[in-house]
Image (spheres, helix red, strand yellow):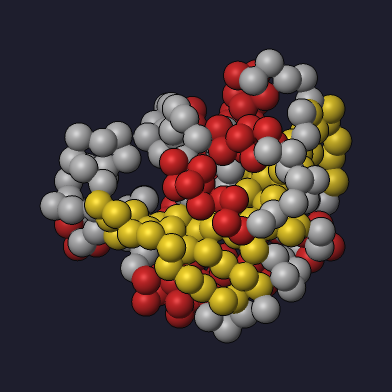
């Protein structure tokens, strides 16, 4: 899946993955992780997610990465923020309101940038990637997060043969296959998404969402 695909999705505003409110499973399960105020939370493939604003409102420093400049610009504009901007080898960094959002390639990030990330929140990143990229994502990007990092991973599960992604179906056995080598994984909740819910994936017979707690060994 090439970057042009996502640039076009944002240009055409085909962003059904964007939610108009913070993720309910984030609000329900975040406090159980025990992440202290002031800690840095990494949000990969962040889009213009309201989850970043919610995490910042809890007192966290948020570090996000997003490929689309349109998404980055929209995020700060919609929150009435004027970011300071600087360019590094990782991309174009935008800083405002306790949030740093990098417009760049998530696969270009490394341990030098992510070393102080105490937590990670992944709602729409892993499920946005086809299988080969999911393996690379877990093997490279998640491996750059430090020992002791904790977080939440939210996935979707549906009969993949019924439609092509994204979003892709990522079942529990794949989550373990991707992360068991370096992360402790605990399924916290699995629930069906009703067909009338905006998060339902069109063209399939059933969709479940699952949330996992992650703990980097």
**Residue 98 lies in what quarter of the image?**
top right
Residue at the spot 34% in from the left edge and 68% down from the top edge = 171
On the picture, is 205 further left or further right than 120?
left
Q: Which residue lies furthest to the left in this view?
A: 205
Picture coordinates of residue 59, whole percent (x, y)? 74, 39
Picture coordinates of residue 140, whole percent (x, y)? 64, 70
Residue at the spot 73% in from the left edge and 43% down from the top edge = 60
Q: Can residue 104 be seen in this view?
A: no
On the picture, is 27 further left or further right than 147?
left
Q: Which image quarter holds the N terminus? A: bottom left
Q: In this view, does 59 lie above or below 156?
A: above
Q: Which residue lies furthest to the bottom in this view?
A: 181
Residue at the spot 70% in from the left edge and 50% down from the top edge = 41
On the picture, is 65 further left or further right than 12?
right
Residue at the spot 34% in from the left edge and 54% down from the top edge = 209
On the picture, is 32 further left or further right than 92?
left
Picture coordinates of residue 82, whole percent (x, y)? 77, 19
């Amino acid at each position: 899946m090439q970057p042009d695909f996502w640039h076009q999705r944002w240009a055409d505003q085909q962003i059904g993955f964007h939610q108009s409110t913070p993720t309910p499973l984030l609000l329900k399960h975040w406090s159980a992780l025990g992440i202290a105020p002031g800690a840095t939370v990494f949000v990969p493939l962040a889009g213009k997610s309201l989850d970043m604003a919610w995490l910042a409102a809890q007192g966290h420093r948020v570090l996000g990465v997003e490929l689309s400049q349109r998404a980055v610009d929209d995020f700060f504009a919609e929150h009435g923020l004027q970011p300071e901007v600087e360019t590094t080898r990782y991309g174009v960094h935008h800083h405002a309101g306790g949030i740093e959002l990098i417009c760049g390639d998530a696969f270009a990030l490394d341990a030098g940038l992510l070393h102080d990330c105490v937590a990670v929140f992944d709602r729409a990143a892993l499920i946005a990637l086809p299988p080969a990229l999911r393996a690379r994502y877990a093997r490279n990007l998640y491996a750059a997060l430090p020992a002791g990092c904790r977080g939440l991973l939210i996935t979707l599960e549906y009969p993949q043969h019924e439609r092509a992604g994204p979003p892709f179906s990522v079942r529990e056995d794949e989550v373990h296959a991707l992360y068991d080598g370096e992360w402790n994984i605990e399924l916290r909740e699995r629930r069906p998404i009703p067909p009338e819910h905006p998060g339902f994936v069109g063209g399939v017979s059933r969709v479940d969402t699952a949330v996992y707690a992650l703990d980097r060994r």
